[in-house]
Image: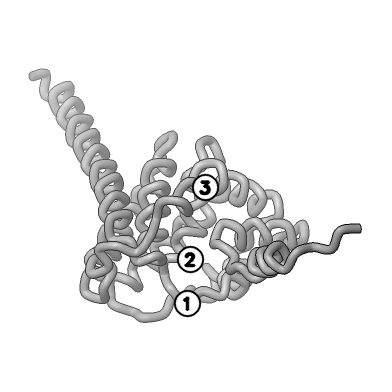
Amino acid sequence: MTPSSPVSAAATGAADTAPRTLLQTIEDLADAAPEEGFSLREIFDRLDESAFGAGLFLLALPCCIPFLYGVPQIVALPMLALAFQMLIGREEPWLPAKLGARKIDKKGLTQMARGGRKWLGWIEAIIRPRLSFITGPVSERVIGALLFCFCASILVPLPATNTVPGFAVAVTAFGLMQKDGLAVIGGCIVGTAWIGALVLGALTGIGLVVSAATGS
């Protein structure tokens, strides 16, 4: 048998010790989950991340997956809680006991991991630190206000209202984690355009109702 060369052994060792990406960590989490799943607090603890970006990205994953129902409704309120904490300038994320106790079962975690890899796997390859001043403490408050609006729109009881804002939150949150200001800007543009479309649609609907009621 031909012994492995020092170069190949070193490469293998480097691959084994390479840090896990967030999507890989979520996939490992889904594999290790019992059938009843994990609570949101347990998930946050296993992610071992103190930044808001990791929590928001994880919770936004099910919202990005078209026609996935149930899980987006579980995660919407915790997303709002995290975004609000960014808005008021908290340095560490925290969840109230009732929200932290919400569970996502193994099936839901598996769907999140697969959907995250399918719809957002590309993000790991293109995001890198740039325009980092946009991810500073002062800017994070403004971003938190925008994320709060995006997360609130997920609760709008209309078909497919979770996908676009979920995508906006996911991209923005990943940008915050990686100090990629360009990704943060892109996510905020998508989310703001979505909110604008909702407001315009609501105003148009109200105008039609008023016109019909007054006969004008």
Q: Quadrant of the image for the C terminus?
A: top left
Element assignment for label 2? helix
Classify 10 Å Cα crowding around label 3: few (below 14), some (14-19), many (20 and above).
some
Element assignment for label 1? loop
Judging by the rendered image, the residue that carries numbered circle 3 is: 121
- Residue 181 image offset from top left, x and y in percent: 28, 60
Question: Above or below — where is 84 with respect to 172?
Answer: below
- Residue 153 image offset from top left, x and y in percent: 34, 48
Q: Is residue 127 left or right of residue 10?
A: left
**In this orientation, does residue 81 appear?**
no
Q: Which mark is residue 55?
A: 2
Looking at marks 2 and 1 on the same chain, the residue that comes earlier in the sequence is marked by 1
Looking at marks 3 and 1 on the same chain, the residue that comes earlier in the sequence is marked by 1
**In this orientation, does residue 78 appear?**
yes
Q: Amino acid at mark 2?
A: Gly
- Residue 186 image offset from top left, x and y in percent: 28, 49
Check the image and name the residue furthest to the right.
Answer: 1
Judging by the rendered image, the residue that carries numbered circle 1 is: 50
Q: Amino acid at mark 1?
A: Ser
Check the image and name the residue furthest to the left.
Answer: 216
Q: Is residue 46 left or right of residue 58?
A: right
Q: Quadrant of residue 7?
A: bottom right
